[in-house]
Structure formats: C-alpha cells, structure tokens
Image (spheres, rainbow, N blue to C red):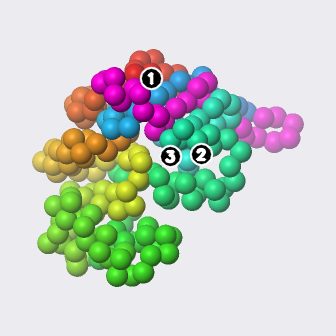
Amino acid sequence: MAASQREKVPVVEMRGVTKVYRSGSSTRTVEVRALSGVDLTIYPGEYVALMGPSGSGKSTLMHIIGLLDTPTEGEYRLGGEPVRGLSEAQLARIRNQRVGFVFQAFFLLPRLTALHNVALPLVYRGLPLAERLKRARAALEAVGLGDRLDHLPSELSGGQKQRVAIARALVQEPDLLLADEPTGNLDSRSSDEILGLFDALHRQGKTIVMVTHEPDVGARAQRIVRLRDGRVAEGGVA
C-alpha cells in the first residue's frame, strides 16, 4: 500500500472485535463465538477480499462492517467515528448514507424498472423525484446500463441485474462498498464482467470489501484478509 493511503483516516478500523451470539432459556444459555479479537484496518481506496471456510466468520464480520450488526466487545470506527453506543436509528442513518451493499441475490423490486430500483435509496434523502432519477440515470450509465433504464428485472440477464444492484449501491456515493459473494448466482462470463466492473471501481478510488470463497475472485482484490475460526489469520492490518 502507498504511504499516502496509510496517512489517511481508515474507512474501517477494528480493534479486538468479538461477536458472541446467545440463545436458549433462562436456565441454560448456549453461546456461539462468531468472531474473536478481530483487528482490521481498511484505508480509503483499498480493495479487500474477505476469505475463509464456511463458519469462519466472514458474513458476521461483513455485517458488523456494514452496521447491520454490532460487536459484543471491542472497538469499531467507521471513517474515524466510533459506532459503539449508537441507537438503531443512528446506525441506520449512517448505513444508508455511507455504506453501499451488493448481495448475491440482487434484491431488486420486481415491479420497478431498473431506473426506479436504483433511485429508491434516495427517497430517504428527501430529494425531489427529478433529482433522484437524474442521479439514478447517471449511476446506471456508469455501470454500462444506460440503455436499460426502463427494463424490469424480469427483462434483464443475471449479469445485468447485478449491475443494477451495483448502481443502486453507488447512487448515494458511499464511503464503502460491501459485496457479499456478488458473482455467486452468475455464469462465468457474467462473473468476469462484474469483476471487471469492480476492478474499474477500484481504479476510480472506491473502497471495496468483498466476501468470497472463490480463490480466483479473491485474487482480483488488492489485499486478502483470511479468517479462520472467527479470527483473522492473515492480512488484517495493512
């Protein structure tokens, strides 16, 4: 990593992050330790792949990074700001403004066009409809779908649906783009196209964290963070 990157405030900074899930009754509690003492630093403009076997803690770590879950112990700072003690409403507001999500299953609304699917997150910003559609159009053009604005999800290929999902994640100009197995539902050609798009976003300076179990996908990233049994085994601190 360039020295200039290390001089910036990390987008993601974790120290000693532990996540314990508890279930059971008042007389018997079962604990599952999903993460244990995770140290992780991700700087602006980095492209990081989270890798590890099933049950290693990848998804839990991504959920905490994206403010979908909170640590049981440890410190997490997003863009230099601590998230401990924030209310659900505060976490939701930060998540909607600063984190973009791309999932394996696309999660597009079937009755909305590509344009209106991408514009949807901007509703929470209180922007006028014309401005929302303008930004959504620009995001779709940026991912190569400027000619598919009025298509419904059912009229798009798998690769095109994922491009719409990426545009939706980018439309709010987030500090961090999180991708959870984004090629998992795609054929090899579409997968390569989507990974090429992530490569281009990285070259543009986007900060990307991608969860994957595929070595060839992880190899496209700038850095690989390997998890094992809820701990960072490699690559946690640049």
Q: Amino acid at mark 2?
A: Asp
Residue highlighted by disc 3: 66
Between residue 228 and residue 41, name the one nearer to us. 41
> x, y percentage for residue 181?
34, 43
Using the numbered discs, state the Cα–Cα distance from disc 1 to disc 2 in whole angstroms: 20 Å
The answer to whether 153 is drawn above or below residue 18 in the figure is below
For disc 3, the neighbor class at 10 Å (few under 14, some 14 to 19, many from 20) is many
Which region of the structure is painted magenta? Answer: 1-29
Q: Is residue 80 visible?
A: yes
User: What residue is shown at x 45% (from left), y 17% (from top)?
Assistant: 233
Residue highlighted by disc 1: 236
Question: In the picture provided, is 232 more to the left or to the right than 49?
Answer: right
Q: Is residue 52 visible?
A: no
User: What residue is shown at x 30% (from left), y 70% (from top)?
Assistant: 136
Q: Secondary structure at mark 2?
A: loop
Residue 32 quadrant: top right
Using the numbered discs, state the Cα–Cα distance from disc 3 to disc 2 in whole angstroms: 8 Å
Residue highlighted by disc 2: 69
